[in-house]
Image (tube, coloured by chain):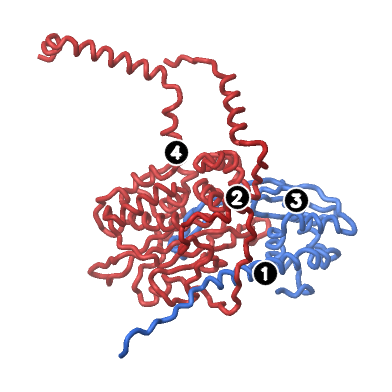
Chain colours: A blue, B red
Amino acid sequence: MIEIAGTHPSDPLDAKRALALLARADHQTLKQVWDGLPAKPQFRKIRGPEVGLVMVKGRIGGGGDPFNLGEASVCRASIETDAGVIGHSYRLGTDKAAAELGAVLHALWQSDDHRQHIESTLLSPVEKRAEADARTRSQQTAATKVDFFTMVRGED
Amino acid sequence: MYVAVKGGETAIANAHQLLADRRRGNRELPAIAIEQIVEQLALSVDRVMAEASLYDRSLAALAVKQSRGDLIEAIFLLRAYRTTLPRFGTSEPIDTARMQIERRVSATYKDLPGGQLLGPTFDYTHRLLDPDLLHDTPVEAPAGRTDADEPVMRVSEILAGEGLIEADGELPADHVAGDLTREPMEFPMTRDLRLQALARGDEGFLLALGYSTQRGYGRTHPFVGEIRIGLVDIELDVPELGFAVSLGEILVTECQMVNQFKGSAKASPQFTRGYGLVFGQSERKAMSMSLVDRALRTQEFGEDVVAPAQDEEFVISHCDNVQATGFVEHLKLPHYVDFQAELDLVRRMRAKHAQPHDHQEAAE
């Protein structure tokens, strides 16, 4: 979707995309990418990993004024690498280890040395999988679309 | 005066041990896994999330397992867990217009942009028990179709184009959405607070109230404009980053109920609306919620409150099944002293009753 060569941590759109994909990467994928790193950075925890809640808002009538629908569990973590880069991660659910891995990988994504690697081994595959899943779901739903036909009765 | 009575520790410990045994059941059968509950009892999980007002599939499944499938107990467990957690913030309002749609039907238009998408529905099944499910019979992969990629327009937008229906729902400009989990309930309530209460309200209670409006107890002449079920993105504004971060997707069900007209000397008649939005896949709940939402707008439309479903304080005060079960079930806890007092009272009344002459004199 987005040019890999063009991704840049200071571009909010790229940063949003990276964090969204880190939030969608499952624990196993994050672990594999971490285990596969040629050199693992040292880091210290700044905050968390910790589990908390986010109040999810809806809109009256779908597009009107907001109301509080209910909460969702969220796990977050912030770390700082030895190189002084701060990484954050926010994801639905209560998987603290995944949140911490996400924050470390977010920090690596921000450093020029690692960005390509994180992009090609993690962000890009997760994005492709999410798009493929969405496409499959949408095609399965489309197969349940009703095609109406009209029965002509009698003569006019 | 309270008299502390101690005892029962051993009985309680043994009762809990017995509960654990009965929950596990026959040890020759494999224990049910949380993932199996999430995957195969998904609608129980959805109900627990909706009424606990906490979206987390794994925790809801754990609650279902721990409660032996008693869903109100599971809801109670998840509500209790929620109180142990800090709140990180409030999401951006979810955008159901951009939902990844799993099901979408309208009862008001046959041919509408996006079409009627039946999705994984029980509708049109014959409701015959399926003996195949007695065994682990292989299930075919669902069919796919690639030619239908039309945007799925809201039915309310179709009607709004002609001005035939009221707007989505606006509150005063300076109004901040209230939160029942932070502020005590006060009546009368604004519609945002009512919707929060209904979204976490008991499905059975709202179903019965919605049904009562159809049977004439506060009629609102409803049509299902649209039901849609699907995934929506959750975004949280994160101050340290300076922008909203996507946390992932959640499944929700939305119902747009179209109801009969309201107009005035100044405004032309137009359809009114009821709205339902629920965590997970639950159109029964979303439909009931939208019927009750519309019924509770009675006074806003200058109609008379004549039926239970229109009585805000009655509906909102009794729709929470954790509160309801707490108060009903507390009756089984020891009331020995209260009951002694009542016993004493009824004995004295009976003694008085046995002397009718004296009683009459006393009365004179």
- Residue at (46% x, 14% y) in the render: B3
Rendered location of residue B158, percent (x, y): 41, 75
Residue, disc 1? A131
Q: Considering only order in the chain, which callout, 4 or 2, is on the residue closer to the N terminus?
A: 2
Rendered location of residue B64, percent (x, y): 57, 43
Mark 3 lies on a secondary structure that is helix
Query: Tag 3: residue type?
Result: Glu
Residue B245 position (above or below residue B25): below
Residue, disc 3? A100
- Depth check, front residue: A71 or B323: B323
Label 2 vs label 4: CA separation?
A: 21 Å
Q: Chain of mark 3?
A: A
Residue, disc 2? B56
- Dots 4, 1 in contact, CB < 8 A: no
Furthest-right residue in this view: A38
Query: Tag 4: residue type?
Result: Gln
Q: Nearer the viewer, mark 2 or mark 3?
A: 2
Query: Tag 2: residue type?
Result: Asp
- Depth check, front residue: B130 or B214: B130
Quarter of the image with the C terminus of chain B is top left
Left or right, B9 with respect to B190, comes to right
Quarter of the image with the N terminus of chain B is top left
Residue, disc 4? B323
The answer to which quarter of the image holds residue A119 is: bottom right
Q: Chain of mark 2?
A: B
Residue B11 position (above or below residue B224): above
Same subunit: marks 2 and 4? yes
Furthest-bottom residue in this view: A156
